[in-house]
Amino acid sequence: MPANPANRIDGIDFWRGFALLTIFIDHVPENIFQHVTQRNFGFSDAAELFVFLSGASVALAYGSRFFRGETVAAVRAVLRRAFTLYWVQVLTSLLIIAIFAAAALWWDNDDLIDDDDRDAVVSSPLTGISGIVALLHQFENVNILPLYVVLLLITPALLLLARRSDWLMLLASGLIYLAARLFELNVPSWPLDGGWYFNPLAWQLIFAIGLFVGRRLRSGGIPYDRRLFALCLAVVVASCVVVTNGFGLVPDLWSDMREVLDHGKTDLGLVRIVHYLALAYVIGHSGLTRLLRRSFVFSPLALMGRHSLPVFSAGCVLTALGEVMVETRPEDFAHTLELGAVIVAAGVLAHYAVAHLIGVYRSVERRPVTRRLSHRRDPPRGAPTFSDQAVKSVSAVRPNGELAHD
């Protein structure tokens, strides 16, 4: 995965953009595109991809600073990013519940707030909003951001272990995962009973693996091994056979296997981990990313992945609007699959529009600084120059001071 001039690895941006669109498609109600997303062909889905790439991005954005000895600066940047994700999560959740409540009132349609998560806020606003602010009450299509907040909060501890040994970090992460699974540990929800849909104590493992891989991307990534590649390919194919019911030839195969396989999403079942890692290894060494880089979809998806937070938030809001459109459509319009397809198509364009506007805004915001640095008077001959390095560093750092791959 080559780095571009802004010190990013564009392959990470592309696959993160792919994950964001997949998450959006899977959450838009009743659309034909849901039948061709990742979850229909294997044990894992876009959630594993998103969390894994988050770990790799964190390693690239903060790990190098941490291991150079800039520990305080790196930790401060991680915490600042966690706080940004926190308030985006809260504001997005409040906006979503406001959309459903307003639509239910306007169209006199209580089905829009009949969901337990929404009803908990509408029926008791003070308690529900308090739960949202505490990250203990989460709506279905925005419940991955609280997980990311927690993962960022534990990042300094993971990096501290990785400073001693990457394998020590993975060992500690694996032990936490095993403890969470064996003792059924999870962060509790409130005011509703239960735990987080994405159990942070389990999902931190795929994040830590992403950190591990991200630490090696600049030096070539995980080495290729022919036997390991063949094994991973066999896992991917076997998973596809099971999930697709033997490509339609063995009815109920997936429903029967689901009862015996450790496939739960909340606690990150083992077959989900194995399948995702096998899939990532196959894709990483198959040349698929290099091939897709020549296609017309690469740049738009990479742009979406580069500005993942505003794009994801926009997708969550668009999902809510799409559900309102489906639930309030005229009674004589029963073609919900077609309507869902239209919503997805419009949503994809909106995702790109948000990413494009954010990209333009940030480039304009950086340009005056770059121009001032590049137009300074040349120093006397033989004196050390600073401007060239400064201009390069500006392109690798966001306007808020965070590294480009965050």
Image (cartoon, rainbow, N blue to C red):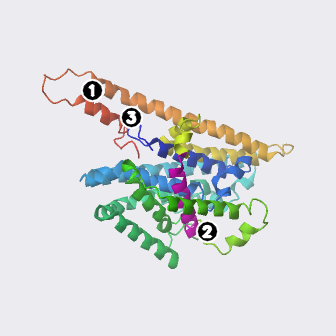
Give the CA distance from mark 1 to mark 2. 54 Å
Identify the element where label 2 is drawn: loop
Q: Is residue 188 visible?
A: yes
Task: Give residue 371's position: percent from left, percent from top.
Answer: 32, 24
Q: Which residue is mark 1?
A: 373
Q: Is residue 215 left or right of residue 331?
A: left
Give the CA distance from mark 1 to mark 3. 18 Å
Q: Which residue is mark 2?
A: 263
Which of label 3 and label 2 is nearer to you? 3
Picture quarter with the N terminus = top left
Please name the residue shown 43% across and 48% down the image.
Answer: 84
Q: Is residue 279 magenta?
A: yes
Identify the element where label 1 is drawn: helix
- Residue type (three-letter) at the residue carrying disc 2: His
Q: Which residue is mark 3?
A: 5
Give the CA distance from mark 3 to mark 2. 40 Å
Which of label 1 and label 3 is nearer to you? 3
Q: Earlier in the sequence, mark 3 or mark 2?
A: 3
Nearer to us in this view, 33 or 342:
33
- Residue type (three-letter) at the residue carrying disc 3: Pro
Highlighted magenta segment, given as a residue range: 266-287
Q: Is residue 80 left or right of residue 336?
A: left
Q: Earlier in the sequence, mark 1 or mark 2?
A: 2
